[in-house]
Amino acid sequence: MTKITMTVNGKSYSGEVEGRTLLVNFLRETLSLTGTHVGCDTSQCGACTVHVNGQNVKSCTMFAIEADGADVTTVEGIAAPDGTLSTVQQAFQDYHGLQCGFCTPGMIMTATKLLENNPKPTEHEVREYLEGNICRCTGYHNIVKAIMAASGQEVTPVAAAE
Amino acid sequence: MPKDSGIGASSKRREDVRFLTGVGNYTDDINMHGQTYAYFLRSEVAHGKINNLDIADASAMPGVLKIFTADDLTAAGGVPCGWQVTDRFGNPMQEPKHPILAEGKVRHVGDPIACVVAETLEQARDAAEAIELDIEELEAVIDMKAALNDGATKVHDDLDNNLCYDWGFVEENRDAVDEAIKNAHHVTTLELTNNRLVPNPMEPRVAIGDYSRGKDEYTLYTTSQNPHVIRLLMGAFVLSIPEHKLRVVAPDVGGGFGSKIYHYAEEAMVTFASKVVNRPVKWTCSRSEAFVSDAHGRDHVTKIELAMDENHMFTAVRTETYANMGAYLSTFAPSIPTWLHGTLMAGNYKTPLVYVNVKAVFTNTVPVDAYRGAGRPEATYQLERVVDKAARELGVDPAELRRKNFIKPEEFPYQTPVAVVYDTGNYHATLDKGLEMVDYANFDKRVAESKARGKLRGLGIAHFIEACGIAPSNLVGQLGARAGLYESATVRVNATGGLVVMTGSHSHGQGHETSFAQVVADMIGIDENMVEIVHGDTNNAPMGMGTYGSRSIAVGGSAMVRATEKIIAKAKKVASHLLEASEGDIELKDGAFSVAGTDKSITWGEVCLAAYVPHNYPLEDLEPGLEETAFYDPSNFTYPSGAYICEVEVDEETGKVDILGFTAADDFGNVINPMIVEGQVHGGVAQGIGQAMLENTVYDENGQLLTGSYMDYAMPRAADVPNFSVDHSCVTPCTHNPLGVKGCGEAGAIGSPPAVVNAVIDALHRGGHTHVEHIDMPVSPARVWAAINNK
């Protein structure tokens, strides 16, 4: 067992880990930050996406030991301390960009990173950037719409009864 | 004007905030005090005899509490099947035992053999690796038709053969259909495969068993679409635990699509194990494990014939289908290719004679059961493909051929030749709406525009019908269901006027916490936020058959409406006492009770308070309190329908297909929350496009699953699907439920695959490749290219 320390959502945490412990397991099991999800075991689905030192990382693909000393942000660290949703989170609610919610933490982390790097993406760029995040519920239509709306670009309104 | 609350409003989903901020409560997020971890040793071969299973050394490994094998489970029953199909000769289907852990034989890759329970997951895994296992590999039965050959290796030694059943429907029409086809002016024939799919909800399955020695009670936390059904099946048939000693909780569940309906062996195993080790036992499925242990979907091989007269009116449909059951019968498996498939073979058409033959086959593959649509996508796919082929053979417009044969709006209710009665519909309206949305009239111009760029453009139409809102209990009982398919709801009004609705429906993405609250709030005329929807716990709702088959709003919603009506009726009695007026004069509007024709009124909250603080209350006539329960058993299925239209461009050089547009014009009856309904259609269409273009489950001849991860199984990603145009403005309300709703969950997955394939075939024909009559799904570039070039 090795002792590691990292900053997660602005707070410093320490814990003992085995060499084989994945970052996602450290977050979920040791720190009880269960917002980060595990949807596959081949680094494909992206439900476990977090930010490590400002980079998008699939936390199932990184050992906890590798994040020793790192600055980590998880989905629990995205809203304001008073609970106010971020622009991306609010757009996902406003445009129905989630259904079962399981892929959502990864989507929020990826979308947040996209808009940091590319504040006004085209729809094509959004779809390409989401390549590493699988959603089975929404057909992506409203996820893409939510991200476009969060970037301040015009989108069609959410459905209304005739 | 769009409404901003209540029925018909696109209320924002209240469940979103917890999911967006990472504080949802999925089963894997639950950790119990003293929890242990289960890991399953699974078969790596498709078919084999267990010659030796020695757990002695492994049991002595660090942290191991107990290793379970079939020897520990002799008192337990097998995993039960919930539906018995009777074959066309009147005999019951062949029904093999489905043991929790393998009993001497393994029958598919992934079949569980032993369960290790240890202090940590790593220790459990390490111990599983140390188990000594000697399996003698036997010939695997993979191909369905070969499985039925005389002398074929049997999946189950104690059955006569690999045929589960040979089903005919409507058996009395068999000869008449044969005659009609023989005498037809034209017969169009098509042979096709409905490709096997893995449902793949993003949350893998998880189960935690927790036995309380103090109370001699069990709790199972599980990723289920129907916790009450799990309680019933596991309690009554597997572990002999009475319902009052077994609580099943399905908290936030990350998608299901059918695969979380069934009672799985792992649920029974952790529940059983928790008593033996006297600690909570948690099992979390990995994705690789899910591919070989979650029930799969579809996997039909079909020949369909459509007969027509000289006026192009359909005179008969005859089909022969081989349906893969896999190695064991999953909970609803026998019903999918039969009652959920054969009863839809009239489609939207007035075809007078239909005969459906289905041979269900055991193979050494993962069990196959319902996946979004369940039997109805298989029916729609073959019918809408053969109608399209017929139009091409006859040289007529495929929209026109459909329109000509549609049941007319004035002909409802319509008795089909396959038992069901469609209550309402207007197929002409939805087809016209869809064609208007895609600007069908100007399609030829777009074909020319694509051609100028060297691409082949095609347009595919499909018009689906489904039977959902499952289902009238007396009917399904006659058809072999071993359960009733009603739903229940309890509405509890609190003293200060807020309501808790406990429903047997389960939300795993559908947004019931929002849309169900809209209905109840609308009925009473109060703010939606005064209504809380509670689901997913057998200790809350009195009973529940759960969520599948697009049944939640139609059946669960109806139960909730009935319970709320009882609440309102009682509240009116209280109000009449408080207002000193006759009960018949009391009106409820906007959350206030008033006396008709006067200005006397009292608020909802005052009546609720009086019910719980009955100082001034008609105690001689009425009990205090305000809580009501209703069970609702539907009198018929509901029949959503709609036009699904796909426009594609095909690159002749590579065979690559691009979807340029996808349009769905649905009739769902009345709609509670349009935003949620459209989201359901989007998701269903994406799954249908996935089936049509990307997804396929491939076993090799030895029964090894070649597509067992997201590296090999092509899940649709954001760039694989287009934006969708969806419409639900054609409304013919359901006539037999109180909300006039039909259900929308499966439509997208039903209507879209034939639309995609029809579009690809259309593009190839317009490009002169008229030899291509059919391409099986998924229509991958390799398959399209081969079809173009293999003349």
Image: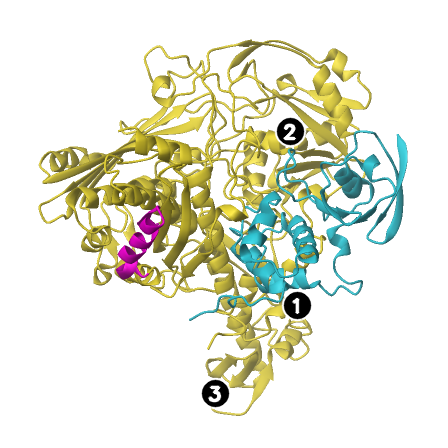
Chain colours: A cyan, B yellow
**What whole-number distance in Å separates the C-alpha atoms at marks 1 and 3?**
26 Å
The subunit letter for the residue under badge 3 reads: B
- Tell me which amino acid carries mark 1: Asn
Q: Are marks 3 and 2 on the same chain?
A: yes
Q: Are marks 1 and 3 on the same chain?
A: yes
Badge nearest the viewer, 2 or 1: 2
Q: Residue at x 53, y 66 (%)?
A: A155
Say if mark 3 contacts mark 2, CB within 8 Å: no
**What whole-number distance in Å separates the C-alpha atoms at marks 2 and 1?**
39 Å
The residue at which mark 2 appears reads as B269
Residue B494, labelled with which disc?
Answer: 1
Instruction: State whether residue B510 appears in this view.
Output: no
The subunit letter for the residue under badge 2 reads: B
The subunit letter for the residue under badge 1 reads: B
Image coordinates for residue A43, horizontal then vertical, percent: 65, 36
Position above or below: B633 against B62 = below
Of labels 1 and 3, earlier in sequence is 1
Q: Residue at x 74, y 31 (%)?
A: B37
Segment tinted magenta in the rendering:
B439-465
Pick the quarter of the image with the C terminus of chain B: top left
Badge nearest the viewer, 3 or 2: 2
